[in-house]
Image (cartoon, rainbow, N blue to C red):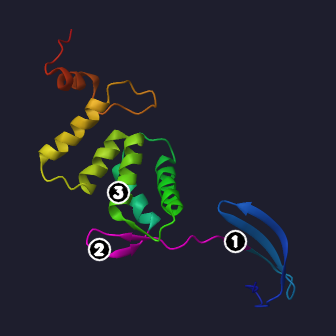
Amino acid sequence: MRCPYCGSDSSRVVDSRDVNNGVRRRRQCLGCSSRFTTYERVLPASLFVIKKDRRREEFSKEKLLAGIRKACEKRPLPAGAVDRLADDIEAELYQVGKAEVASAVLGDMVMKKLKELDNIAYIRFASVYRDFADITDFKQEVDTLVSAETAPHSDGQLPLLPEERSGVLAGGRRRRQR
């Protein structure tokens, strides 16, 4: 390891600790006695995303996070939920062990995880990802979610529609309010 102060190639490790996804080492230069820190991390193999137009683009976690954050904007989600979701998706992609993954597979993974996390974020993402041609396609997707929403939310997720509106859609007529 080259010393950042004097450029000497000789140093010794003073302290070593595991941090996040790697190792942090404190080193002392044997030439000038200065101390400096180095980080060692395993670099995962490159992963490429095959786009719809057959172009290949290197996978970017930042781009994935940006799309998920946009869908989850102004939603009452727990702190760190979006980052955990992106981490889970990235880990799944690398576990597959392939050098290339279709953008459709990546989009489906995001949709599945968002559906579990928050229905509104799921609909927002789906509206862009699936590129709904008209309002009928969009309504069909929302109706699918509403019909799947028969049980109360035990996982803390807010309902897709307020209770009085879901009664209108399910029963076809409005309940009388007192």
Identity of the residue drawn at 18% across and 23% down:
168
Residue 157's place in the image compared with 138, above or below, is above
Q: Name the quadrant of the N terminus.
A: bottom right
Q: Position of residue 172 (x, y in %)?
A: 14, 22
> Residue 54: which disc?
2
Identity of the residue drawn at 79% across and 90% down: 9
Quick one: label 3, few (<14), some, or many (20+) residues within 10 Å?
A: some
The answer to which image quadrant residue 166 occupies is: top left
Would residue 49 be found to the left or right of residue 173 on screen? Answer: right
Instruction: Measure how far apart labels 2 and 1 are at the Cα level.
Output: 37 Å
Front position in the image: 101 or 173: 101
Contact, CB < 8 Å: mark 1 with mark 3?
no
> Mark 2 falls on what kind of element?
loop
Amino acid type at mark 1: Tyr
Q: Is residue 77 visible?
A: yes
Residue labelled with disc 3: 107
Asked whether the beta carbons under mark 3 and mark 2 sit within 8 Å of each other, the answer is: no
Residue type for callout 3: Gly
The quadrant of the rendering that contains the C terminus is: top left
Query: Does residue 149 lie above or below 49 as drawn?
Result: above
Q: Residue at x 27, y 68 (%)?
A: 52
Q: Position of residue 106 (x, y in %)?
A: 38, 59
Which secondary structure lies at badge 1?
Answer: strand
**Dividing the picture into quarters, in which one does residue 2 lie?**
bottom right
Q: Which residue is at the front of the view, 26 or 90?
A: 90
Label whose residue precedes the other's in the sequence (2 or 1):
1
Residue named by callout 1: 39
Task: Report the span colored magenta.
Answer: 38-59
* Residue 27 lies within the magenta run: no
Disc number lying in front (3 or 2): 2
